[in-house]
Every structure is written in structure tokens, then in C-alpha cells.
Image (spheres, rainbow, N blue to C red):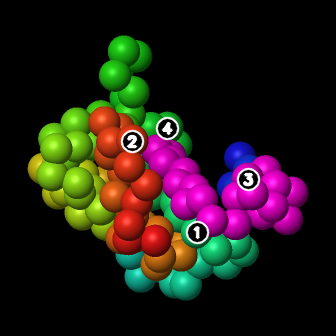
Amino acid sequence: INIPGLQGLVSPVFHPKLRTIPRVFVIDACRGGIGSGSVDVAGRGPSSTHQASLLCTVYGNSPGIQVNESAIDGGYFTQCFKKQLGKTVDINATLSQLTKQAGKALQEMTHHAQMCWLDGDPLCHDVVFNKNSGKKDEAM
């Protein structure tokens, strides 16, 4: 998947109304030929994929060439992210807080074989995602 191309589909260049709307991608993916062991974060540097403001991506990854998953519940990262989203809905957690909690749960679930991280515009990190709220986010 060409992630920058996918993100470009929700770019303000193509959709000017998106200039003020935070956009978040959640990606659960494998990391290639590494078969086991802890995640090596040394190669991860500043993102070159985020070319628009108010755009973030939350990544979770699995060792090897396929995502460890359940046919019903999805990948381990997806499971942890969804569970944490449900837990934090009543406390108005920010995307940054949600990602930290999902990351802790993911590392526990996978014995530190997987991790997650948040990449992109820091203005999105403080956005509250609350599925039960009809209020406009005041952090923006």
C-alpha cells in the first residue's frame, strides 16, 4: 500500500474543507522479514510521509511477513487500539494518550514483539476522539 498516496486522498489540496479537520489513519501492518524479537526503532526517523497539516498516522506492527491476527477481531494492534478506544471514551482521552495506552497493551499482549507509534502533525496529538460526543473539539 502506498501510504502517502492513500493520505493524499484526504488532502486539503483535493478537498479544501479538510484544512481544519484532523485526519487520522490507523494502520496494523507487518514489518517484513524479521521473524522474532523486539522491535528495532533505530531506523525510525522524522516522517517524510505527512505532507499536510492535521494529519496523523497511528502505526502498529508485527514481526515477519504477515500481521498476527484473529479472523474475527483483526490484528493484535487493532484489537488493543479498539479496546483502549472503548476504555477512554468517557474520559476524553487525546490521541496521544490513546496511543500510549494501546502501545502498553500491545506490548503486554505480544511480549514486546510489537509496538505502536504516532506520527504526523503534533496538533493532532492533542485532539480528543470521543465517539459519544457531539461537541466540537476545543483543543484545536
Which of disc 3 and disc 1 is earlier in sequence? Answer: 3
Counting other residues with Cα less than 10 Å from the Cα at mark 1, is it few (<14), some (14-19), or many (20 or more)? many
Between the residue at mark 3 and the residue at mark 2, the CA separation in whole angstroms equals: 22 Å
| Image position of 83 with respect to 71: above or below | below
Type of amino acid at the residue the image marks with label 2: Gly
The disc placed on residue 66 is: 4
Q: Nearer the viewer, mark 3 or mark 2?
A: 2
Which of disc 4 and disc 2 is earlier in sequence? Answer: 4
Identify the magenta region: 9-37
Name the residue carrying label 1: 54
- In the image, 84 versus 54, the foreground residue is 54
Name the residue carrying label 3: 10
Type of amino acid at the residue the image marks with label 4: Gln
Counting other residues with Cα less than 10 Å from the Cα at mark 3, is it few (<14), some (14-19), or many (20 or more)? some
The disc placed on residue 134 is: 2
- In the image, 126 versus 135, the foreground residue is 135
For the point 86% across and 57% down, the residue is: 14
